[in-house]
Amino acid sequence: MQELSVRHLLGIKDITAEDIQLIFETADNFKDVLNRPIKKVPSLRDITIANVFFENSTRTRLSFELAEKRLSADVINFSSSGSSVKKGETLLDTVNNILAMKVDMIVMRHSSPGAPHFLSRHIDANIVNAGDGTHEHPTQALLDSFSIREKLGEVAGKKVVIIGDILHSRVALSNIFALQKLGAEVMVCGPVTLLPKYIKELGVKVEFDVRKALAWCDVANVLRIQLERQQMKYFPSLREYTLYYGIDKKMLDSLDKEIVLMHPGPINRGVELSSDAADSHHSIILNQVENGVAIRMAVLYLLASKQ
Ligand code: CP
Protein backbone atom coordinates (compact mmCIF):
# COMPACT_ATOMS: atom_id res chain seq x y z
CA MET A 1 0.00 0.00 0.00
CA GLN A 2 1.22 3.53 -0.84
CA GLU A 3 1.83 5.80 2.15
CA LEU A 4 2.06 9.52 2.84
CA SER A 5 5.58 10.85 3.45
CA VAL A 6 4.41 12.58 6.68
CA ARG A 7 2.70 11.51 9.94
CA HIS A 8 1.00 14.89 10.45
CA LEU A 9 -0.66 17.18 7.93
CA LEU A 10 0.69 20.52 9.12
CA GLY A 11 0.90 22.31 5.78
CA ILE A 12 1.09 21.78 2.02
CA LYS A 13 4.68 23.09 2.17
CA ASP A 14 5.73 19.87 3.96
CA ILE A 15 4.15 17.34 1.57
CA THR A 16 5.13 16.13 -1.90
CA ALA A 17 3.27 16.15 -5.22
CA GLU A 18 3.08 12.33 -4.83
CA ASP A 19 1.39 12.79 -1.43
CA ILE A 20 -1.19 15.09 -3.04
CA GLN A 21 -1.85 12.60 -5.88
CA LEU A 22 -2.27 9.80 -3.31
CA ILE A 23 -4.74 11.93 -1.32
CA PHE A 24 -6.69 12.68 -4.55
CA GLU A 25 -6.84 9.01 -5.61
CA THR A 26 -7.99 8.01 -2.12
CA ALA A 27 -10.56 10.83 -2.14
CA ASP A 28 -11.88 9.59 -5.52
CA ASN A 29 -12.70 6.27 -3.83
CA PHE A 30 -14.30 7.97 -0.83
CA LYS A 31 -16.34 10.23 -3.11
CA ASP A 32 -17.80 7.06 -4.66
CA VAL A 33 -18.67 5.87 -1.14
CA LEU A 34 -20.36 9.21 -0.36
CA ASN A 35 -22.57 8.83 -3.44
CA ARG A 36 -23.85 5.42 -2.32
CA PRO A 37 -27.08 4.97 -0.31
CA ILE A 38 -24.94 3.74 2.64
CA LYS A 39 -22.28 6.42 2.98
CA LYS A 40 -20.22 4.79 5.69
CA VAL A 41 -17.15 2.50 5.77
CA PRO A 42 -15.56 0.82 8.82
CA SER A 43 -11.99 2.02 8.00
CA LEU A 44 -11.36 3.98 11.27
CA ARG A 45 -13.57 1.88 13.57
CA ASP A 46 -10.83 1.62 16.23
CA ILE A 47 -9.70 5.26 16.05
CA THR A 48 -10.80 8.18 18.24
CA ILE A 49 -10.41 11.70 16.84
CA ALA A 50 -10.70 15.02 18.70
CA ASN A 51 -11.67 18.13 16.76
CA VAL A 52 -10.02 20.92 18.75
CA PHE A 53 -11.18 24.34 17.59
CA PHE A 54 -9.81 27.53 19.13
CA GLU A 55 -11.33 29.67 16.35
CA ASN A 56 -14.75 29.86 14.68
CA SER A 57 -15.60 27.53 11.80
CA THR A 58 -18.62 26.21 9.94
CA ARG A 59 -17.39 24.28 6.88
CA THR A 60 -14.08 22.86 8.14
CA ARG A 61 -15.42 21.70 11.48
CA LEU A 62 -18.58 20.06 10.13
CA SER A 63 -16.70 18.57 7.18
CA PHE A 64 -14.08 16.95 9.44
CA GLU A 65 -16.76 15.65 11.80
CA LEU A 66 -18.75 14.17 8.93
CA ALA A 67 -15.60 12.67 7.36
CA GLU A 68 -14.71 11.04 10.70
CA LYS A 69 -18.22 9.65 11.15
CA ARG A 70 -18.34 8.34 7.56
CA LEU A 71 -15.10 6.46 8.40
CA SER A 72 -16.72 5.06 11.62
CA ALA A 73 -14.23 6.81 13.95
CA ASP A 74 -15.27 7.83 17.46
CA VAL A 75 -15.41 11.64 17.55
CA ILE A 76 -15.18 14.25 20.31
CA ASN A 77 -15.47 17.99 19.74
CA PHE A 78 -13.71 20.68 21.75
CA SER A 79 -14.38 24.38 21.38
CA SER A 80 -12.24 26.88 23.31
CA SER A 81 -15.28 29.06 24.06
CA GLY A 82 -16.87 27.66 27.20
CA SER A 83 -13.76 25.52 28.00
CA SER A 84 -11.12 25.69 30.74
CA VAL A 85 -8.90 27.65 28.33
CA LYS A 86 -10.89 30.60 29.72
CA LYS A 87 -9.45 29.71 33.17
CA GLY A 88 -5.87 29.96 31.88
CA GLU A 89 -5.12 26.36 30.80
CA THR A 90 -2.33 26.17 28.20
CA LEU A 91 -2.68 24.70 24.70
CA LEU A 92 -0.36 21.81 25.56
CA ASP A 93 -2.15 21.02 28.84
CA THR A 94 -5.51 21.14 27.07
CA VAL A 95 -4.38 18.75 24.32
CA ASN A 96 -2.54 16.41 26.74
CA ASN A 97 -5.72 16.13 28.83
CA ILE A 98 -7.71 15.25 25.69
CA LEU A 99 -5.08 12.67 24.70
CA ALA A 100 -5.18 11.13 28.21
CA MET A 101 -8.72 10.00 27.31
CA LYS A 102 -7.14 7.63 24.72
CA VAL A 103 -7.56 9.89 21.69
CA ASP A 104 -5.50 8.91 18.60
CA MET A 105 -5.69 11.97 16.35
CA ILE A 106 -6.08 15.72 16.78
CA VAL A 107 -7.67 18.00 14.18
CA MET A 108 -6.89 21.55 15.30
CA ARG A 109 -7.79 25.08 14.26
CA HIS A 110 -5.93 27.84 16.07
CA SER A 111 -5.48 31.58 15.55
CA SER A 112 -1.69 31.39 16.10
CA PRO A 113 0.46 30.53 13.06
CA GLY A 114 2.61 27.49 13.94
CA ALA A 115 0.39 26.20 16.80
CA PRO A 116 0.00 22.69 15.21
CA HIS A 117 3.76 22.60 14.45
CA PHE A 118 4.46 23.36 18.13
CA LEU A 119 2.08 20.56 19.20
CA SER A 120 3.71 18.09 16.81
CA ARG A 121 6.99 18.52 18.71
CA HIS A 122 5.37 17.64 22.03
CA ILE A 123 2.75 14.92 21.41
CA ASP A 124 2.70 11.52 19.71
CA ALA A 125 -0.82 11.61 18.19
CA ASN A 126 -1.26 12.47 14.49
CA ILE A 127 -2.17 16.13 13.97
CA VAL A 128 -4.16 17.68 11.13
CA ASN A 129 -3.94 21.45 10.78
CA ALA A 130 -7.47 22.77 10.18
CA GLY A 131 -6.15 26.34 9.78
CA ASP A 132 -3.46 28.12 11.83
CA GLY A 133 -3.95 31.88 11.81
CA THR A 134 -2.67 33.52 8.64
CA HIS A 135 -0.32 30.61 7.88
CA GLU A 136 -1.77 27.43 6.25
CA HIS A 137 -5.09 25.65 5.70
CA PRO A 138 -3.91 22.46 3.97
CA THR A 139 -7.20 20.57 3.61
CA GLN A 140 -8.83 23.67 2.05
CA ALA A 141 -6.06 23.81 -0.59
CA LEU A 142 -6.38 20.07 -1.22
CA LEU A 143 -10.14 20.29 -1.74
CA ASP A 144 -9.68 23.37 -3.96
CA SER A 145 -7.18 21.63 -6.27
CA PHE A 146 -9.27 18.44 -6.21
CA SER A 147 -12.29 20.50 -7.34
CA ILE A 148 -10.26 22.09 -10.19
CA ARG A 149 -9.11 18.59 -11.26
CA GLU A 150 -12.73 17.38 -11.16
CA LYS A 151 -14.01 20.34 -13.20
CA LEU A 152 -11.17 20.75 -15.73
CA GLY A 153 -9.68 17.23 -15.86
CA GLU A 154 -6.28 18.21 -14.45
CA VAL A 155 -4.52 20.97 -12.52
CA ALA A 156 -1.21 20.90 -14.44
CA GLY A 157 -0.99 23.72 -16.97
CA LYS A 158 -4.06 25.56 -15.68
CA LYS A 159 -3.89 29.28 -14.91
CA VAL A 160 -5.28 30.04 -11.45
CA VAL A 161 -5.67 33.53 -9.99
CA ILE A 162 -6.21 34.04 -6.27
CA ILE A 163 -7.98 37.36 -5.74
CA GLY A 164 -8.33 39.52 -2.64
CA ASP A 165 -6.86 39.54 0.84
CA ILE A 166 -3.70 37.49 0.24
CA LEU A 167 -1.90 39.07 3.22
CA HIS A 168 -4.18 37.59 5.89
CA SER A 169 -5.10 34.39 4.07
CA ARG A 170 -3.95 30.90 5.06
CA VAL A 171 -6.01 29.64 2.10
CA ALA A 172 -3.85 31.67 -0.32
CA LEU A 173 -0.52 30.32 0.94
CA SER A 174 -1.67 26.68 1.01
CA ASN A 175 -3.25 27.07 -2.45
CA ILE A 176 -0.06 28.56 -3.90
CA PHE A 177 1.99 25.60 -2.60
CA ALA A 178 -0.56 22.99 -3.77
CA LEU A 179 -1.14 24.49 -7.23
CA GLN A 180 2.59 24.88 -7.90
CA LYS A 181 3.32 21.31 -6.76
CA LEU A 182 0.62 20.13 -9.20
CA GLY A 183 2.04 22.16 -12.10
CA ALA A 184 -0.44 25.07 -12.33
CA GLU A 185 0.53 28.68 -13.07
CA VAL A 186 -0.46 30.93 -10.17
CA MET A 187 -1.27 34.64 -10.11
CA VAL A 188 -2.33 36.76 -7.14
CA CYS A 189 -4.45 39.87 -7.56
CA GLY A 190 -5.47 42.49 -5.02
CA PRO A 191 -4.68 45.94 -3.65
CA VAL A 192 -0.94 46.36 -3.01
CA THR A 193 -1.65 46.74 0.71
CA LEU A 194 -3.21 43.24 0.83
CA LEU A 195 -0.30 41.48 -0.89
CA PRO A 196 2.65 40.36 1.28
CA LYS A 197 6.01 42.02 0.43
CA TYR A 198 7.62 38.59 -0.14
CA ILE A 199 4.90 37.40 -2.57
CA LYS A 200 7.08 37.40 -5.73
CA GLU A 201 9.62 35.15 -3.97
CA LEU A 202 6.92 32.44 -4.04
CA GLY A 203 7.14 32.38 -7.86
CA VAL A 204 3.66 33.76 -8.54
CA LYS A 205 2.58 36.42 -11.02
CA VAL A 206 1.20 39.64 -9.51
CA GLU A 207 -1.63 41.68 -11.06
CA PHE A 208 -3.44 44.69 -9.61
CA ASP A 209 -6.21 44.94 -12.24
CA VAL A 210 -8.92 42.37 -11.58
CA ARG A 211 -10.26 42.53 -15.17
CA LYS A 212 -6.82 41.67 -16.57
CA ALA A 213 -6.53 38.84 -14.03
CA LEU A 214 -9.90 37.40 -15.09
CA ALA A 215 -8.93 37.66 -18.77
CA TRP A 216 -5.71 35.68 -18.02
CA CYS A 217 -7.06 32.84 -15.90
CA ASP A 218 -8.87 29.51 -16.25
CA VAL A 219 -9.87 29.59 -12.58
CA ALA A 220 -10.52 32.52 -10.21
CA ASN A 221 -10.37 31.69 -6.50
CA VAL A 222 -11.83 34.70 -4.70
CA LEU A 223 -10.99 35.28 -1.03
CA ARG A 224 -12.88 36.93 1.78
CA ILE A 225 -11.71 40.25 3.19
CA GLN A 226 -10.63 39.17 6.69
CA LEU A 227 -11.66 42.22 8.66
CA GLU A 228 -11.19 40.33 11.96
CA ARG A 229 -7.43 39.95 11.30
CA GLN A 230 -6.81 43.52 10.15
CA GLN A 231 -5.15 45.73 12.76
CA MET A 232 -5.22 48.81 10.52
CA LYS A 233 -6.99 50.12 7.45
CA TYR A 234 -5.62 48.48 4.28
CA PHE A 235 -8.11 50.22 1.94
CA PRO A 236 -10.35 53.27 2.34
CA SER A 237 -13.70 51.47 2.61
CA LEU A 238 -15.46 48.20 1.75
CA ARG A 239 -17.41 50.13 -0.87
CA GLU A 240 -14.18 51.18 -2.59
CA TYR A 241 -12.79 47.62 -2.36
CA THR A 242 -15.93 46.30 -4.08
CA LEU A 243 -15.67 48.99 -6.76
CA TYR A 244 -12.12 47.94 -7.73
CA TYR A 245 -11.95 44.23 -6.78
CA GLY A 246 -15.55 43.01 -6.44
CA ILE A 247 -16.61 40.43 -9.05
CA ASP A 248 -20.13 40.24 -10.47
CA LYS A 249 -21.80 37.99 -13.04
CA LYS A 250 -21.68 40.66 -15.76
CA MET A 251 -17.86 40.68 -15.58
CA LEU A 252 -17.75 36.87 -15.86
CA ASP A 253 -20.31 36.76 -18.72
CA SER A 254 -18.39 39.42 -20.67
CA LEU A 255 -15.21 37.28 -20.88
CA ASP A 256 -14.61 35.59 -24.24
CA LYS A 257 -14.20 32.20 -22.48
CA GLU A 258 -15.63 30.21 -19.57
CA ILE A 259 -13.77 30.46 -16.29
CA VAL A 260 -14.34 28.54 -13.06
CA LEU A 261 -15.26 30.65 -10.02
CA MET A 262 -14.24 29.43 -6.56
CA HIS A 263 -14.44 30.77 -3.00
CA PRO A 264 -13.40 28.96 0.20
CA GLY A 265 -16.24 30.53 2.21
CA PRO A 266 -17.60 32.22 4.17
CA ILE A 267 -18.56 34.70 1.42
CA ASN A 268 -19.07 38.38 2.15
CA ARG A 269 -21.87 38.71 -0.40
CA GLY A 270 -21.80 42.10 -2.08
CA VAL A 271 -18.16 42.73 -1.08
CA GLU A 272 -15.73 40.41 -2.92
CA LEU A 273 -18.49 38.58 -4.85
CA SER A 274 -21.97 39.64 -5.88
CA SER A 275 -24.75 37.16 -5.20
CA ASP A 276 -25.43 36.76 -8.92
CA ALA A 277 -21.79 35.69 -9.47
CA ALA A 278 -21.64 33.40 -6.42
CA ASP A 279 -24.84 31.61 -7.48
CA SER A 280 -24.09 31.56 -11.23
CA HIS A 281 -23.19 28.61 -13.49
CA HIS A 282 -19.55 29.79 -13.30
CA SER A 283 -19.39 28.93 -9.60
CA ILE A 284 -18.26 25.59 -8.11
CA ILE A 285 -18.38 26.90 -4.54
CA LEU A 286 -20.76 24.21 -3.21
CA ASN A 287 -18.84 21.48 -5.12
CA GLN A 288 -15.77 22.59 -3.13
CA VAL A 289 -17.73 22.05 0.10
CA GLU A 290 -18.96 18.64 -1.09
CA ASN A 291 -15.43 17.57 -2.04
CA GLY A 292 -14.11 18.67 1.35
CA VAL A 293 -15.65 15.62 3.04
CA ALA A 294 -13.99 13.12 0.65
CA ILE A 295 -10.63 14.93 0.88
CA ARG A 296 -10.75 14.94 4.70
CA MET A 297 -11.74 11.26 4.74
CA ALA A 298 -8.67 10.56 2.58
CA VAL A 299 -6.32 12.59 4.79
CA LEU A 300 -7.56 10.99 8.03
CA TYR A 301 -7.49 7.48 6.55
CA LEU A 302 -3.95 7.85 5.18
CA LEU A 303 -2.60 9.41 8.39
CA ALA A 304 -4.26 6.71 10.53
CA SER A 305 -2.46 4.06 8.50
CA LYS A 306 0.86 5.71 9.54
CA GLN A 307 0.18 5.04 13.27
N1 CP B 1 -13.28 27.63 4.37
C1 CP B 1 -13.27 27.60 5.71
O1 CP B 1 -12.23 27.33 6.35
O2 CP B 1 -14.49 27.88 6.29
P1 CP B 1 -14.78 27.84 7.85
O3 CP B 1 -14.00 28.94 8.50
O4 CP B 1 -16.27 28.00 7.99
O5 CP B 1 -14.31 26.51 8.38
Image (cartoon, rainbow, N blue to C red):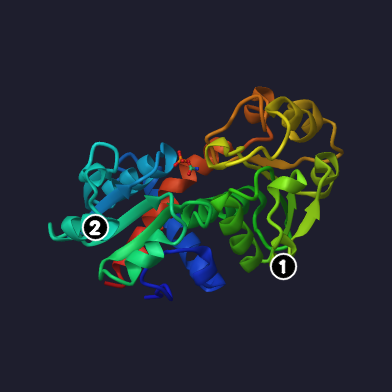
Q: Where is residue 33 in the image (x, y as percent from the top left)?
A: 37, 49
Q: What residue type is labelled 1?
A: Glu
Question: Badge 2: few (under 14), some or many (20 or more) residues near its Cα, within 10 Å?
Answer: some
Nearer to me, 145 or 27: 145
| 49 over 290 or under it: above or below | below
Quarter-of-image position of residue 306: bottom left
Q: What residue type is labelled 2?
A: Val
Q: Is residue 245 left or right of residue 34?
A: right
* Residue at 84% over, 43% down: 209
Q: Is residue 113 left or right of residue 154?
A: left
Figure quadrant of the C terminus: bottom left
* Residue at 33% over, 54% down: 107
Residue bearing the label numbered 2: 95
Instruction: Please report whichever mark, 1 or 2, sits nearer to the chain's N-terminal start.
Output: 2
Residue bearing the label numbered 1: 201
Nearer to me, 96 or 58: 96
